[in-house]
Image: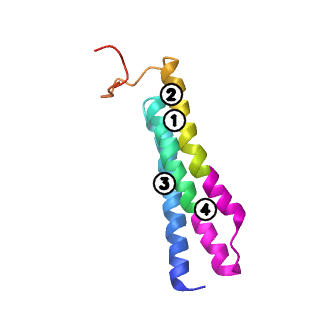
Amino acid sequence: MSAVAEWTIVICILIGTFLSIVAAFGVLKLPDVYTRNHAASKSTTLGVLLTLLGTLIYFYATDGEFNARIVLGIVFIFITAPVAGHLISRAAYHTGVELSERSVQDDLSQKK
């Protein structure tokens, strides 16, 4: 395995791990369901995608095989996680879950 492949793998997995940790802190520390959901869906999606990309590059560089299961995992997470996050936020908004009072503006509200 070349040094470029090793560094690419390390960088992808470290950035993916960092983004997943940031998402976990966001879910724990953010004030309401909407901002928590944003942290969970966006940061975690990118973190998992980068981790899986590093894994894909690793198996391709070491074994010379292109792993279709990892590619399918990347595709399914890339498609389903943001859509699920959007639908959860939309359902929370339509059921009347309150926004945080900390400088959050409701652009969809009919009240002016």
Identify residue for label 3. 19
Residue 111 seen in the figure: yes
**Residue 20, numbered label:** none
**What's the image's color scheme?**
rainbow
Identify residue for label 2. 90
Quadrant location, the C terminus: top left
- Amino acid carrying mark 4 in the image: Leu
Answer with mark 1 or mark 4, whichever residue precedes in sequence. 4
Answer with mark 3 or mark 1, whichever residue precedes in sequence. 3
Answer with mark 3 or mark 4, whichever residue precedes in sequence. 3
Identify residue for label 4. 52
| Mark-to-mark CA distance, 2 and 1 | 6 Å
Identify residue for label 1. 86
Q: Which residues lie in the magenta part?
A: 53-76
* SS for dot 4: helix
- Amino acid carrying mark 3 in the image: Leu
